[in-house]
Image: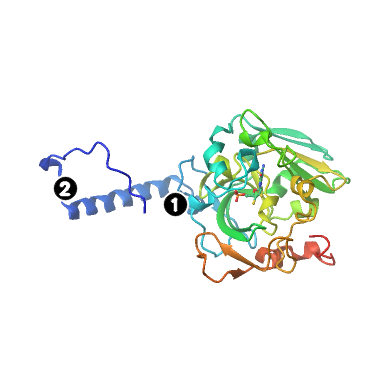
Amino acid sequence: MHVPKDRGFQQTPASEITSRSTYLRRRQLMHGLAAGAAALALPATAQTAAAARPGKNAALPAARSTVPGAVSMDKPTLYADTSSYNNFYEFGTDKADPARTAGSLKTRPWTVAIEGEVKKPMTLDIDALMKLAAMEERIYRLRCVEGWSMVIPWVGFSLAELIKRVEPTGNANYLQFLTLADKAQMPGLSSRVLDWPYAEGLRIDEANHPLAMLAFGMYGELLPNQNGAPVRLVVPWKYGFKSAKSIVKIRFVQKQPRTSWEEAARDEYGFNSNVNPKVDHPRWSQATERRIRQDGLFAKKRPTLMFNGYEPQVGQLYAGMDLKKLF
Ligand code: MTE
C-alpha cells in the first residue's frame, strides 16, 4: 500500500490529544449523523449510488434500475482500476494515457446534435439531455475483445428514451454515434491510428433495447473524462469498443454506417461485435476472460458467456443470424 510521506508534521499539544477510544466513539457518532443527514436529503431511491462514491467528481444520484438484467450481482471492479485502465485513443493509445491526459477535455458547455432520419431533429445542451429521463444506476459487466473484463455501476438511462423523443422515420435503420475530435484538447488526434472523429454504430432495434444505455456517470458521480465524459454509450452485450465516448452527434441513417474499428481492421472488429465465446478474434480467444484485479495472473480464467451473459434479454435480436459471419 502506498503511504504518503508525512510532510510538515507538527507536534500536537498534549491538551489537544484525545484518547483513541474517545476519538473512535466521536468518529462513529459523526459518521452516523452525516449518513443520517445525507439519507434525509436524498429520496429513498437515490441512496444506492450516492453511498458508494469513491472519486472526486460531483454526485449524480440515481435509483437502482428495474430494467430486467440491468443490475449484475457480480462484485463491482474498483473505481481506481476502471478510471485508470482505459481505451480512449483521442488521449493516447496506452491504457494509462487517458487518465493522465484527458484532464484537458472541457465537458461544459457541450451539445449533442441528433439528426438524419428523424421527424424532430434537435441539438440538446448536455444539461438538458441529462434531464430527459430519470437517472438509473445499472451494474453492467463490460468485456473487452482483448480478454479482460470489468463490472461497473453506471449512471444514466436507456438510449430508447432519447430515440422516442426525436421520432425516427421509417428509413431509420441504424444509428451512428460521432464523438468529439478537437486537436486543441485531444493530444491523440495528431496520430492517424484511427480515422477521426471516432464513430460507432448500432441497428435501431439494438439501440432501442432497454439495456442500451446513455451513461453520464459511474459509481454515483459524473463520469471522469477518461471514461467518456460528459456522455457515452454502454451496450453491455457487445464488446467494450462499441461504447463511444464523449458523444457530440447521433445520426439516424438508412444504411449501415461507418465505424472507426471496422475501418481500422475489418477482419478483427465487425459491425455487430457481440460478445460471443464461440467466435474467436484472429488474435485473442473469446472463450474466457480475466476480471481486472479480481482474477490474478495465475488464477484460472473465467468462462465468457454468450452475449456477455445478457442472452435471456437480447438473444432474440440475433435469432437466425450467422454470428460466425456477422461477428
Ligand atoms: N470512444 C472514443 N471516442 N475513443 C476511443 O478510442 N475506445 C473504445 C470505447 N470508446 C474509444 C471509445 C474502446 S476500444 C473501449 S474498450 C471502450 O471505449 C473502453 O471504455 P472504458 O475505458 O470505460 O473501459
The mark nearer the N terminus, 2 or 1, is 2
Q: Which mark is residue 51?
A: 1
List x then y, in percent, for residue 284. 68, 62
Q: Which mark is residue 29?
A: none
Whether 252 is drawn above or below 150: the answer is: above
Q: Quadrant of the N terminus?
A: bottom left
Crowd tier of the residue under label 1, counting other residues whose Cα lies within 10 Å: few below 14, some 14–19, many 20 or above:
some
Whether 284 is drawn above or below 186: the answer is: below
From the image, tell me which residue sits under label 2.
18
Residue occupying the far left of the picture: 14
Q: Residue at x 70, y 62 (%)?
A: 275
Whether 223 is drawn above or below 153: the answer is: above
In front of the other: 136 or 244: 244
Residue 248: quadrant of the picture: top right
Q: Residue at x 15, y 51 (%)?
A: 19
Q: Is residue 131 visible?
A: no
Q: Is residue 241 visible?
A: yes
Q: Which three-letter amino acid code belongs to the residue tagged 1?
A: Ala
List x then y, in percent, for residue 249. 73, 37
Residue 236: quadrant of the picture: bottom right
Which element carries disc 1, helix, strand or loop?
Answer: helix
Q: Quadrant of the C terminus?
A: bottom right
Q: Which three-letter amino acid code belongs to the residue tagged 2?
A: Thr
